[in-house]
Amino acid sequence: MPTTTKHENIALLNMMSSDNLDDDLKSVQLHFPSDRRLQSDGACVEERVRTSRGDLLVAVRGDRSKRAILTYHDLGLNYAANFQAFFNFVDMRPILEQFCIYHVNAPGQEEGASPLPEDYTYPTI
């Protein structure tokens, strides 16, 4: 490492005190997850499916005449947030050619969903 770079790094570290860091941290603004969105990339056709527990959003990707793969997202996510990057990965192309993917969203988890009624009984698995 050149001497000037080493001295510059030491000078920068000496300028940083815990007081400055505390002030910097106090100015951090919170961002709520509802402000962040990962929406469908258009590869899926979204459909509403009526059930006895209410409507569900099901996103279908691929040829429906082929064998099915059914996905169900993780807690606090939806199909786009949970599976979009996975199924868009180049190594998944052979799978997508052989199957039709059905992404089932849990009630109230799709993007822009209205809050569930207070008397709503969430379905069990």
Image: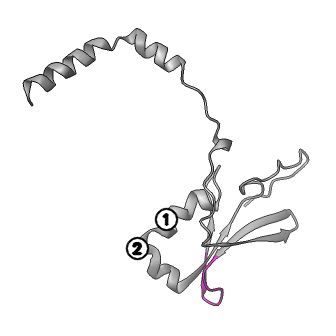
Residue that mark 2 sits on: 91
Q: Quadrant of the N terminus?
A: top left
Percent of width and height locating residue 5: 15, 26
Q: Earlier in the sequence, mark 2 or mark 1?
A: 1
Q: Is residue 31 magenta?
A: no
Dividing the picture into quarters, in which one does residue 40 lie? bottom right
In the image, residue 77 sits, relative to residue 14, either above or below, namely: below
* Extent of the magenta region: 61-69
Percent of width and height locating residue 79: 63, 62
In the image, residue 70 sits, relative to residue 14, either above or below, namely: below
Q: Quadrant of the C terminus?
A: bottom right
Q: Residue furthest right?
A: 119
* Viewer-side residue, 20 vs 67: 20
Residue that mark 1 sits on: 86
Badge 1: residue crowd in 10 Å (few <14, some 14–19, many ≥20): few
Disc 2 marks a residue whose amino acid type is Asp
Q: CA distance from mark 2 to mark 1?
A: 9 Å
